[in-house]
Image: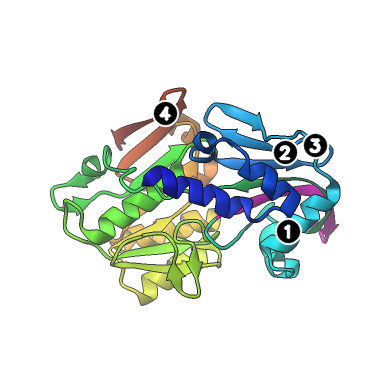
Amino acid sequence: MREQGDVMRYLQAAALLPPHLRRRAQQVDKAYQAVAEELRLRAGRPMTVVCPQGERLVPDDEPVQAGDLNLVVEIATRASAHTAMEQVRSGYFTVSGGHRIGICGSAVVKDGAIFNLRHLSSLAIRIAREVLGASASVADKLWEGDTFQSTLILSPPGGGKTTLLRDLIRRLSNGTDHPALRVGVADERGELAAMYHGLPQFDVGRQTDVVDGCPKAAGLMMLLRGMNPQVLAADEITAPEDCAALLLAANCGVSLLCTAHAAGLDDLKTRPMYRPLLENCCFKRLVVLTRRETGRDCQVTRL
């Protein structure tokens, strides 16, 4: 059943492609569809599918045309590319189902900031995966008695942080093996819950409240002030204002569950932005994900 669901997720992402590229993506072997992580389109190069084993050409290695990239954006935004502009300025936008499209091209800069992207050169369609039970091997190590310990999940990009975070949110919210907790999720990019018309498309648990589509720091404060959460969760802490919001929440007695890009604790310590969180002991557990040929390895450390 899980493999069938993974193939459906792949086909859902492939539906964002123009018809001639979609047909080629659908011809990829089902075994690769089930584990595919991204579809890569580069102008002038054949389309590829990214799997744990690396990038593979899709059947029929005809080069992708620049117009194909624009068509993907049109399809993904339902001919309303301007609605995704705020996200596009960050180099990506999230679509229904939680899939994320990374985007490259010639930047249009206004007042020192990226205003738009034109002459698109490449796209990366990251396939959103829901892996129920992904946190089973680590979840119990994140508790001290009946108290959930604030946890930070680390890995390089593509290491599986979002998948693990989502499953931990579901587990905490449903009370799997421990008392159920109210979880507030600041889902800035829409990848954790994949909200659609107010309903999460992923299972994030019975006692979870989600704010999506707004900056993490603002979302965290909205949840803290309005929803009385016991745990606050956010994916990819990347800005000083995110750290400031988490520090405030920790001082209010709320547990934290977050992710960040880093290879490990030593790597994280080299980045000044995270220093206040570490110095104030905002996190009690560290989960480091390492990608290996045989799968992903999870190491839990007490801080």
| Residue found at the far top of this picture | 293
Which residue range is magenta in the image?
99-113
Could you tell whether 100 is left or right of 242 in the image? right
Would you say residue 100 sits in the magenta stretch?
yes
Mark 3: secondary structure: loop
Camera-side mark, 4 or 2? 2
Q: Label 1: state its secondary structure.
A: helix
Q: Are marks 3 and 4 in contact (CB under 8 Å)?
A: no
- Verify CB contact (< 8 Å) between mark 1 and mark 3: no
Q: Which residue is mark 4?
A: 295
* Distance CA(mark 1)–CA(mark 2): 16 Å
Which residue is label 1 attached to? 73
Q: Amino acid at mark 2?
A: Met
Nearer-N-terminus badge (1/3): 3
Task: Measuring from the top left, give residue 256's x and y in whole percent.
Answer: 35, 54
Marked residue nearer the N-terminal end (4 or 2): 2
User: Could you classify mark 2 by the number of other residues whose Cα lies within 10 Å: few (under 14), some (14-19), or many (20 or more)?
Assistant: many
Q: Which mark is residue 62?
A: 3
Which residue, given by chain and number where applicable, does mark 2 sit on?
47
Gap in angstroms between the C-alphas marked 4 and 1:
32 Å
